[in-house]
Amino acid sequence: MNPSTALATVLVDTLVRLGLRHLVLSPGSRSAPLAYAAARAADEGRLTLHVRVDERSAGFLALGLARAGELVAVVTTSGTAVANLHPAVLEAHHAGVPLVVLSADRPHELRGSGASQTADAQARMFLPSVRYSADVPAPVDPDRQAPAWRSLLSRAVAFARGLRGDGPGPVHLNVGFADPLTPSPGDVPPGPGLTQVHGPGVPAPVALERGPRTLVLAGDAPDPATGAAARELAESAGWPLLAEPSSGARGGERAVGPYRLLLDAVDAEGPLGAVERVVLFGHPTLSRPVTRLLARDDVELVVVSAAGTWSDAGFRAARVVPAAQVQGPPGAGEQEFAARWDRAGKLAADAVDAALDAEAGLSGPWAAREVVAACAADGSTLVVAASNAIRDVDLTARPLGVRTVSNRGLAGIDGTTATAEGVALATGPTRLLLGDLAFLHDANALLPVPGEVRPDLTVVVVNDDGGGIFETLEHASAVDRATFERVVATPHGVDVAALCAAFGVAHSRPATRAEALAALTARPRGLRVVELVTARDRVRPRLERIAAAVRAAVA
């Protein structure tokens, strides 16, 4: 077995033994030893191999698989191919998602020589956005080096899983390969090196005192345990739960639906009563009312985080605890506070439904409500783009406990479709809700690769020909309309049906709510796109009507 084949075989074998079940690969020459080793492991049934032509889509596909709880590796060749993984690595870093990046490289002695596809900084490309990185030289003596390679992988996977360091996240191994790069027969080099790493254990919960009028706020959390802990605390304490769609906590008797509209009443000392304490889980980023709440001087903020980092954008955290619990029954003030929130939440949700039902035609908020209901009905997973789509779900969808994924680490729209494909391949039937710009930004994810399995994924595109979210922000009224359209809204006029036809993807464009509902509720089977054409100039007035309806309902 030649040295490059031996190194690649040991790396793939070790990853599988450490729990790897999925490997995503983009083709290349320098990375060929890893490709051959992965193909052999897939043929033996030891892992599932996914091949994608575009490295950026490959990175987000791997991220989607990892968001579903899998240990995933993504492999690229050297040069600009590695840089195309950077958006997915950044999202994994900020969201706390385990991801193993294997980039192939020329032998070290060629760095700085002008050799083709040799980037001097490739080994350091993702710093400081990875939990661990290593620069692995091209192999010389595989039998002697194999234990070191296994130990290196054991260490990297431990950091990726958050068993050491600042919680789960991406790791990067830059691996040198020397010619020959084609496979040769032989046995895997023997020897020790595989290390079993254990975490620090279950953190002891801190008891929170009874008395203060308390909200539990759950932001984005890729780890299902975080959302489960937020929901458990809210239900055991009897406190209202304000849960973002991708928190993993948006369900149960304590969850409040359109909470961001109710927070205005809270801030104004309205009928809900003043908030005295917030217990925060995850990474909240969706709404300005939440941001204002977390920055208030008169609200005690307790952050629950078992990792080395925590969210505190308002710089008001009084305590950071690894876990939280509450003992004893709630006091009269707590009970009255929770009852007001419960009553207001139901009135607000009914008001939102009535406002949506009173409007004819298709819209993003209406689609968000119906897609969530469809996922709840058939048990499918929901993936939502980190723009208007996630905000529409947060505002209009009932808290039905639907498993929801959104790339909220950096809240970018790139790679959304590829992420959804990864989620669908790992979890089964999935619906994706996104806008037209997010869809176009990741059109390469639709690229068919012969022999690769296409996921059971229904892609719901709310097409308002541009950036609808900007209609809700100050930009829409800050400049003249022509300038706004050109440099902010960016209409495109793309024929989505023709684009889908070019990629061989089924496409439909329902014209009525009845037709759209039939398309949205059909159980995802294969890859298909449902395009809902809407009017962008109605986005802001619609949200204003919904907000007015909620204010009237809870007044």
Image: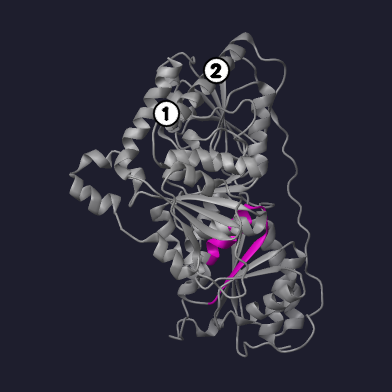
438 or 535: nearer the viewer: 535
Tell whether label 2 touches label 1 (CB within 8 Å). no
| Residue, disc 2 | 343
Please identify the quadrant where the N terminus is shown. Answer: bottom right
Residue 467 x %, y %: 34, 49
Above-or-below relation of 56 to 468:
below
Q: Residue at x 36, y 44 (%)?
A: 469
Residue 372 appears in the picture as rendered: yes
Name the side, left or right, on which 271 lies relative to 18. left
Q: Residues within 10 Å of mark 2 (few under 14, many from 20)?
A: few
Name the quadrant containing residue 221.
top right
Label of residue 227 in the image: none
Farthest right residue in view: 191
Residue 400: x %, y % from top left: 61, 35
Q: In the rendered structure, which segment of residues is drawn in magenta?
A: 58-77
Rendering coords of residue 100 (x, y %): 62, 63
At label 1, counting other C-alpha atoms closer than 10 Å, the crowd grade (few under 14, some 14-19, many 20 or more) is some
Count up the numbered dots.
Answer: 2
The label number, if any, that marks residue 355 in the structure image: 1
